[in-house]
Image: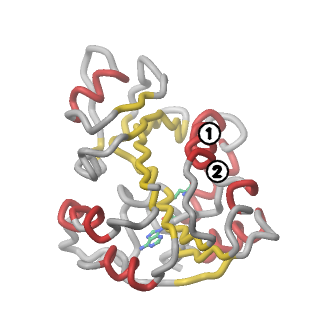
Amino acid sequence: MSYLLHPSGGVLYHLRAWRWRRTLWTPFHAEVSAWLSAWRPKSPHLVLIGPSGGYALCAEFLARFARISVLEPDPLARWLLRRRFPSAPLHWDGGTLTQTGGFGRLAAAFPDAAFLFCNLLGQELQGQAADFNRGAWLAELEVALTGRSWASWHDLVSTERAPSSRQRLCLHHAIALEELLGHYWLGGRLEVIDHETASICPAAPRRHAIWQLAPRRYHLIEWLSAP
Ligand SMILES: C[S@@+](CC[C@H](N)C(=O)[O-])C[C@H]1O[C@@H](n2cnc3c(N)ncnc32)[C@H](O)[C@@H]1O
């Protein structure tokens, strides 16, 4: 039951998807589609981590893989994902990703696979301990997945203030979060929820886009990928 009521997914998220995915969410999903079509891992095995009902995914992308392992604790999300993509080769899996060493265990559990983190790294996670330290957890990602194909889109910050610009931004490496926020919100006071993901792979190229989750809820998203 707790999976269905979880703050980073669950019933509220599915209701929002039903309400907004053909309107407010469409521009951001077009952006994710472009990111996914440019990401070309060689492995025929994909691990999807936190895809929910697959609202940001498309059949063309999933059709590139012969096997798709899915780590998604929400049973309603799994049911919706299967229903949205009936011919995709989906296999449900589990794991202890949120504990120390989680990325290393993930790499070892799927030695031949590419990994796609579907807006998971900045979320409150199932299995997250009370003293969970996101910075320490994420610091292990780059080393644990060295030499592996992986990609992630994740929240950097979210806010109730509408951005001044929704232009996509491509950067050769990370810049200071305040500088990045200045590209999207000009002047004035800005209150944000920091999703504590700004430190991931600082030297890697990255892309940014705005996702309007709800009429008064805006997320600044980052996309990172390793071939
Ligand atoms: C914000 S939602 C993902 C959004 C979704 N990818 C989309 O594009 O619409 C976060 C998802 O992560 C899942 N999740 C939470 N904890 C997880 C964990 N420990 N491992 C894998 N998935 C998890 C939630 O059930 C939820 O579906």
Could you say where residue 1 lies in the image, as x and y percent from the top left?
A: 53, 80
Mark carried by residue 17 = 2
Please name the residue shown 36% across and 63% down the image. 124
- Quadrant of residue 68 within the rendered picture: bottom right
Mark carried by residue 25 = 1
Secondary structure, mark 1, is loop
What is the spatial separation of the Cα atoms under label 2 and label 1, in whole angstroms?
Answer: 8 Å
Say which amino acid is labelled 2: Ala
Could you say where residue 197 lies in the image, as x and y percent from the top left?
A: 29, 51
95 to 10, vertically: above or below: below
55 to 103, vertically: above or below: above
Label 2 residue near ligand 1, CB within 8 Å: yes
Visual colour scheme: secondary structure
71 to 170, vertically: above or below: below
- The residue closer to the viewer here, 227 or 19, is 227
Say which amino acid is labelled 1: Trp
In the rendered view, does 128 fall on the left or right side of 126?
left
